[in-house]
Image (tube, grey):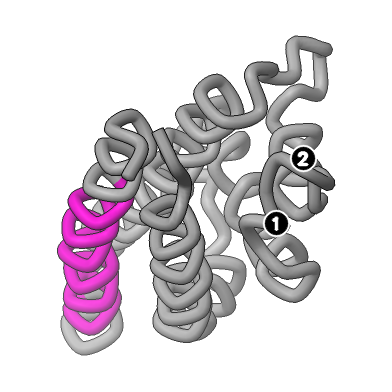
């Protein structure tokens, strides 16, 4: 097995474990926000949704730099990185994520941009509700697809 690929596979597993905790925290904060009618819990939801996408993007950046040997650098590099991960690169690697997952992640990527650039009291609870409602399914799909990609990495020869 290729040592570099084995390290990447292990990092995917580690990051997915961390992301599971982030997902759980977002769901718990949403539950508290709705039961206690306390907007301060929405700040926690937003921060954890931000962390969810950022964690996935860290995985994608590492794969792009190590396996693809190129990371997008244009002004819209975050969008380009998702497209790169959805694209099969013949003789290099299969697609890392499906078009379905890419579409879901675009919502979290866009929201992360909002969190970074807007005061939290401007966040719309309706948007948080949609993202939280889709979070478990999106994480499940991301986990499945990234685990499959990790399995692919383990087959690479050194």
Q: On the picture, is 56 further left or further right than 4? A: right
- 7 and 114: which one is in front? 7
All told, the count of numbered labels is: 2
Report the mark closest to the observer, 2 or 1: 1
What residue is drawn where x is 77% and y is 40%?
84
Q: On the picture, is 88 further left or further right than 2? A: right
Q: Residue 100 is drawn in which quadrant?
A: bottom right
Q: Which residue is mark 1?
A: 94
Disc 1 on helix, strand or loop? loop
On the image, the x and y values in percent for residue 19 come to: 27, 58
- 108 and 71: which one is in front? 71
What secondary structure is the magenta-colored segment mainly? helix
**Is-magenta flag for residue 6?**
no
Q: Residue 117 is drawn in which quadrant?
A: top right
Marks 2,1: beta carbons within 8 A: no
Span colored in magenta = 12-32
- 19 and 107: which one is in front? 19
Disc 2 on helix, strand or loop? helix
What residue is drawn where x is 28% and y is 59%?
16
For marks 2 and 1, give the CA distance.
11 Å
On the image, the x and y values in percent for residue 128 come to: 50, 67
What residue is drawn where x is 49% and y is 60%?
152
The C terminus appears in which quarter of the rendering?
A: top left
Q: Which residue is mark 2?
A: 84
Question: Within 10 Å of the Cα at label 2, are there few (<14), some (14-19), or many (20+) other Cα atoms?
Answer: many
């Amino acid at each position: 097995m290729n040592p570099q690929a084995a390290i990447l596979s292990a990092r995917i597993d580690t990051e997915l474990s961390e992301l599971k905790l982030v997902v759980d925290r977002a769901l718990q904060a949403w539950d508290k926000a709705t039961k206690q009618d306390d907007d301060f819990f929405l700040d926690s939801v937003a921060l954890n949704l931000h962390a969810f996408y950022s964690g996935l993007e860290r995985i994608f950046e590492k794969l792009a730099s190590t396996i693809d040997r190129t990371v997008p650098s244009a002004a819209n590099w975050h969008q380009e990185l998702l497209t790169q991960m959805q694209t099969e690169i013949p003789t290099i690697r299969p697609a890392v994520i499906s078009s379905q997952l890419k579409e879901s992640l675009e919502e979290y990527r866009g929201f992360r941009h909002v969190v970074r650039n807007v005061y939290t009291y401007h966040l719309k609870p309706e948007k948080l509700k949609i993202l939280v409602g889709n979070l478990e399914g999106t994480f499940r799909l991301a986990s499945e697809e990234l685990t499959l990609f990790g399995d692919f990495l383990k087959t690479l020869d050194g």
